[in-house]
Amino acid sequence: MADTYLSAPKIFEIAKSSYQRVIYQTPESTDGGKDDATIAILFSAMTVEVFLNELIELARDREESDAKSLFSVCKPLLEAHKELETRLFEASRSTSDTPFVKGNQPFQDFNLLVRVRNRIVHLLAGDTPTNGLIREHVKILSDLRSRKLIVDDRQVLINREQEGLIEKYKSLLSDQEINSIPVPFLYSVSTNSVAEWSLKVASEIITSFVNTMRDSGFKNHLQQHVKFFQIEPDNLSDLQEWYKMILKFGCSTSNEFIEKIRKKELVVSFPDVIKEV
């Protein structure tokens, strides 16, 4: 059978590159509102969706019983526009003796990732605000907080000290006094930690899906592609440690660090990890 080109690995590379950029720019930051973090989150979720869609097409012409089963189960779900979680869950049931369990990991984290993605992309007209916050947003933020991915109350209110963001809203709020404002959901979730978690969730759910499939030529074929969804051991933590070192040199950003090197104010040896940035 001819080699197959999948788009999902490229989507995952975009997610990883976006995460690397946000860590490169703001290594120690726990603030939200990072554009590259948003990209990493969205493309991590997209990776799984593209993988599953391509998986269905791969199964179309294969002879293995599991491939036929997956195609017959999942193709109608795709055409009926069923939720991504449902499609992946049923795909696992059709190909594995130990399929995903909705209340267990890694499916539980995957479900949360999809909820985050959906709330970024789809804001429904029927959503009801509660004290300026949309109820489903509060649930998602609570789940992220329980995983220590957001750690304080900045996802609820922006304090008056953050004048830059407050100023953006003054023209919209007439002359009324502004002491605090609700933080947009997108700002709340677009953090370094949520971006890193999203990558790990996408990598783990795809790897787990393939590894728990029943043995077959179809599984062997997919295992050739799984390597493209891996995060190298310590890859992300190495980046974080490297950028912590930048701060030790008295630099608030990596650009400042590089500029000091150019001016020969600093002399350092670059580890291999920086070449990947």
Image (cartoon, rainbow, N blue to C red):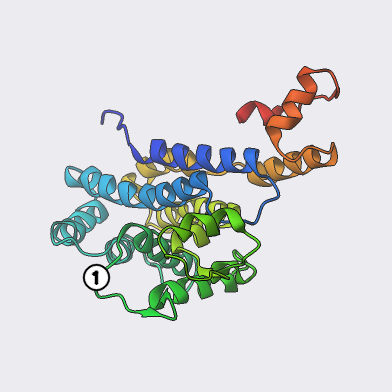
Q: Report the residue that reaches farthest toward the top.
A: 263
User: Which residue type does callout 1 highlight?
Assistant: Ala
Residue hosting label 1: 125
Point 57% across, 38% down: residue? 21
Point 86% across, 22% down: residue? 265
In which quadrant is the C terminus drawn? Answer: top right
**Crowd tier of the residue under label 1, counting other residues whose Cα lies within 10 Å: few below 14, some 14–19, many 20 or above:** few
Nearer the observer, 64 or 268: 268
Nearer the observer, 234 or 137: 137
Q: Relative to 231, is 92 above or below?
A: below
Point 28% across, 47% down: residue? 55
Nearer the observer, 162 or 220: 162
In which quadrant is the N terminus drawn? Answer: top left
Point 61% across, 29% down: residue? 276
- For this view, does 244 lie left or right of residue 7? right
Q: Report the residue that reaches farthest toward the front.
A: 175
Residue 109 spot, x, y in % from top left: 48, 66
Residue 146 spot, x, y in % from top left: 59, 74
